[in-house]
Image (cartoon, rainbow, N blue to C red):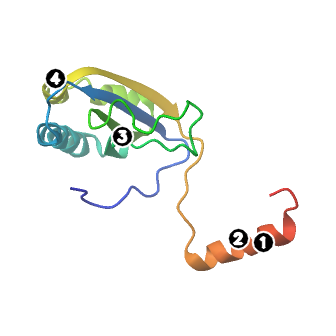
Amino acid sequence: MFMGNMIVDVPEDAIVNINYVVLKEGVTLDDVMERVAYLCEHVKTYHSDTGFYGGFVLLNTGGVSLEGSTAGQTTEHPLKDREVLIVTFWRSLEDHEESHRSEGFNKLFKELTELAESTYEVVYKMLWQGRAYDPETAKRAREAKQTHCNTC
């Protein structure tokens, strides 16, 4: 189902919007993906030159990392297959908000929210981003840490 490459070169001062969409019981992934595809295509078409850098859509698989969580020993998230995150990167909150004021966007977003129990969108400031090292750089980084970092 994954199409395309990950986003590269998102500026350090970008804002990140995460729209949490909790689907109604019984909604199929195919129904959601069709509506999300139209919505994302609209944003790319009309806002790539007005502050939109890119985005991606995620589905909660239910998996919970016990090593990365402090919220108990849950082994399956309760919103498995029902929580979709729409993550977008923007130049500014104003650019993002302007994109949502169009009639076309509102029509498509309404069609998506008809499948949802709830949605809410949170705005974040980018603090860090990075790609994995290639194997040779990773090897040199480990060697440097072993040589120069007593507390690492």
Rendered-image quadrant of the C terminus:
bottom right
Mark 1 is surrounded, within 10 Å at the Cα level, by few (under 14), some (14 to 19) or many (20 or more) other residues, namely few
Q: Position of residue 65 (x, y in %)?
A: 50, 44
Q: On the image, which quarter does residue 28 sit in?
A: top left
Q: Is residue 95 visible?
A: yes
Q: Which mark is residue 141?
A: 2
First in sequence: mark 4 or mark 1? 4
Q: Is residue 118 above or below residue 31?
A: above
Q: Which mark is residue 62?
A: 3
Circle 1 sits in a helix, a strand or a loop, which is it?
helix
Q: Nearer the viewer, mark 3 or mark 1?
A: 3
Q: Which mark is residue 144?
A: 1
Q: On the image, which quarter does residue 52 sit in?
A: top left
For the residue marked with disc 3, what is the amino acid? Gly
Rounded to the nearest angstrom, the CA distance separating label 3 from label 1 is: 37 Å
First in sequence: mark 4 or mark 2? 4
Q: Position of residue 31 (x, y in %)?
A: 11, 37
Mark 4 is surrounded, within 10 Å at the Cα level, by few (under 14), some (14 to 19) or many (20 or more) other residues, namely few
Query: In this rendering, would 66 be left or right of 5?
Result: right
Q: Is residue 59 above or below residue 93?
A: below
First in sequence: mark 4 or mark 3? 3
For the residue marked with disc 4, what is the amino acid? Lys
For the residue marked with disc 2, what is the amino acid? Ala
Q: Position of residue 43 (x, y in %)?
A: 24, 39
Q: Position of residue 120 (x, y in %)?
A: 35, 22
Circle 2 sits in a helix, a strand or a loop, which is it?
helix
Q: Nearer the viewer, mark 4 or mark 1?
A: 1
